[in-house]
Image (cartoon, rainbow, N blue to C red):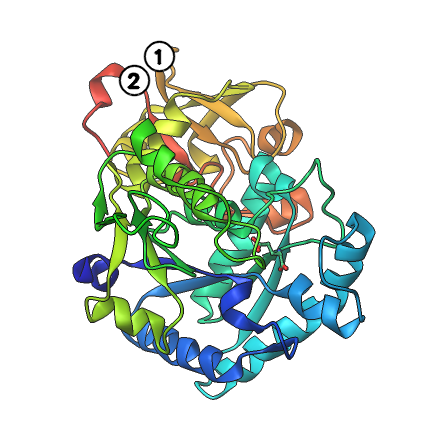
Amino acid sequence: MTDHLAKARRVVVKVGSALLVDSAAGAVKRDWLASLAADIAALKSAGKDVVIVSSGAIALGRRALGLKAGALRLEESQAAAAVGQIRLAQAYVDAFHVHDLAVAQILLTLEDTEERRRYLNARETLTTLLSLRAIPVINENDTVATAEIRYGDNDRLAARVGSMMEADMLVLLSDIDGLYTANPQRDPDARHIPEVRAITPEIERMAEGPVSGFSKGGMESKIAAAKIATAAGTAVIIASGHVMNPLAAIKNSARTTLFVPRISPGQARKRWLAGGLSAEGAVVVDAGCERALLSGKSLLPIGVKSIAGAFDRGDAVVVKNEAGREIGRGLIAYNTEDAKALIGRRTVEIEAILGYRGRDEMIHRDDLAFTGSEEESKP
Ligand code: GLU
């Protein structure tokens, strides 16, 4: 357990409203947030990438707008989110300022992780922010999300972000220190489960609705999130956030539940690329490029012989060699027209040819999976 967080390279931390917002005062629990920021600063110093997914906008905004307790109408929660999100973001800016870390606000809607082109954009921005040592603080864009088009709760959002960013760890800071065989508030015989290796129907039955009256997700949504995350190769820890320095507490062996993935994020992504995608076109590469790909390099325009089909940026395409044999499948960084214009050209020429500075790689190696039979064991 302790090890998993210590070994993780990229961590998503999900913070629930109930932990962050003092419901009586309708304000951010600043001391608690300061302790979380100190933990995250320590993870950063240890060389890890950290992304935060934070709830709290609606909880903060409803109070500021004088909205009454109880369920809000959709327009009311959208309005509350608009007012609360600014306060939420400011609280994070203040908390990380002490550690000289910049905070970046990202508001996502469902399509941003489900639609490939937008997914690539969101991923690129987050990657850039991480490379610049910023701390992305993500929330659902509640002011435009509607009942039909939304993640629904930030547990699922955090799981999607984890898989999009190939995080190896997702920490769900929660009201409760993990999964129990039954609801421990009601059943004195409920037993804590420290580790889950497969999310079976039996495990799913252990989860019930929300524990707190404040946040959207209960144990059910945490299990749903754990399913999404572990399928993408991300381990999940459910831990109590009702302590100061909640991440340090995990390292110091606090009681938690760990969901263990069976594959790594990289393998999960390659499997997804190789399997589930319908290819919109094909890129034929020369022998030198094929060799480069098989040795783990990206696909550069200079190695391309021809382009077939019609695709958009971010679509899946088949990569073939000159004999017509499929080498792999990947997500292409250019649409058909631009890709054709770049055939056989050097990377330095891209801007002059297209009039904008696109990606150096036509298909980045992280976006390429080998599907040709001989290359099964290759990267
Ligand atoms: N996005 C919502 C907010 O910031 C919270 C959703 C959730 O609690 O899961 O208020």
Decide if residue 307 is on the left or right side of residue 79: left
Q: Amino acid at mark 1?
A: Arg
Name which of mark 2 and mark 1 comes first in the sequence. 1
Residue 21: x and y in percent read: 57, 72
Q: Which residue is mark 2?
A: 372
Quadrant where the C terminus sits is: top left
- Name the foreground residue: 113 vs 66: 66
Residue 171: x and y in percent read: 37, 57
Q: Are marks 2 and 1 in contact (CB under 8 Å)?
A: yes
Quadrant where the N terminus sits is: bottom left
Q: How many marks?
A: 2
- Name the foreground residue: 76 vs 117: 76
Residue found 47% across the figure and 84% down from its top: 31
Q: Which residue is mark 1?
A: 325
Residue 309: x and y in percent read: 59, 16
**Residue 348 appears anywhere in the view:** no
**Residue 85 appears anywhere in the view:** yes
Residue 106 drawn above or below residue 157: below
Residue found 72% across the figure and 46% down from its top: 145
Decide if residue 183 is on the left or right side of residue 209: left
- Name the foreground residue: 60 vs 323: 60
Residue 6: x and y in percent read: 22, 64
Residue found 35% across the figure and 12% down from its top: 325
Q: Amino acid at mark 2?
A: Gly
- Name the foreground residue: 140 vs 371: 140
